Amino acid sequence: MDEETEYRIRRVQAGEIQDYVYIVQKYQKQIFMYCWRLLSSKQEAEDAVQDVLVKAYEKINLYKPEVNFTSWVYKIAYYHCINIIRRKKMHQKWKFSLLSQDQSMNSPAEMLEQRLFNEPLSRALEKLNVAERNLLVLRVFEEKSFAEIGEILNKSPEAVKKKFARTKIKIQKMMNSTEEERCQNYNILLKTKI
């Protein structure tokens, strides 16, 4: 962590709340991207990043410099996103029935969001459990080291490496099967006489 961030954190912990603006500006974008990748929803990520930064502010006195501040904030974001995902799963059947009844057109923003997250990788990410998805997002998209991920997940770097290797193999298999399905569907379409 850079000296300026460390200095600002100490000032916020001492009651100088105006210095938290610096921390928000420094971490807001990366936490937003992390939440967006975990939640697969821009709107939910926008809401989540605000909640995460408020929680970080409320708990900043619990932060100890022995831990990397970035890892500390990511840990808050991870648990916040897990709670959102759990709530979404609880309401999934209800939402599905509502969506099937409402056949209205999507807005351009919703269509763009669907395109961003309808690629084979995104579909495969959705099939992973939350822990696997989080690990992949932290390592691939956020480019965190195994040591940093270990700090966030309370696991040893070796355990993180092993889990990452297994997750990577799993997602490659899912992406290959998705590609095979697409080829089979294309071949069936070619053989069908119109």
Image: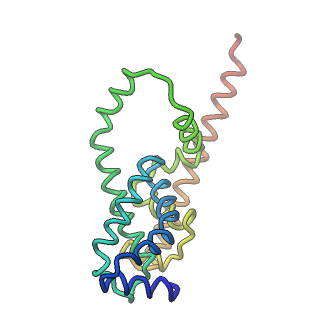
Provide residue 54's location: percent of width, then percent of height. 33, 65
Name the residue rendered at 56%, 51% in the picture. 173
Q: Quadrant of residue 14?
A: bottom left
Q: Quadrant of residue 97?
A: top left
Check the image and report above or below for 131 versus 88.
below
Provide residue 78's location: percent of width, then percent of height. 38, 63
Q: How many marks?
A: 0
| Quadrant assignment for the C terminus | top right
Name the residue rendered at 51%, 61% in the picture. 137
- Taking the image as shown, residue 119 lies to the left or right of residue 5, namely right
- Taking the image as shown, residue 72 lies to the left or right of residue 83, namely right
- Taking the image as shown, residue 76 lies to the left or right of residue 32, namely left
Name the residue rendered at 52%, 36% in the picture. 110
Residue 144 vs residue 160, the one in the foreground:
144
Provide residue 41's location: percent of width, then percent of height. 46, 46
Provide residue 55's location: percent of width, then percent of height. 31, 67
- Protein image colouring: rainbow
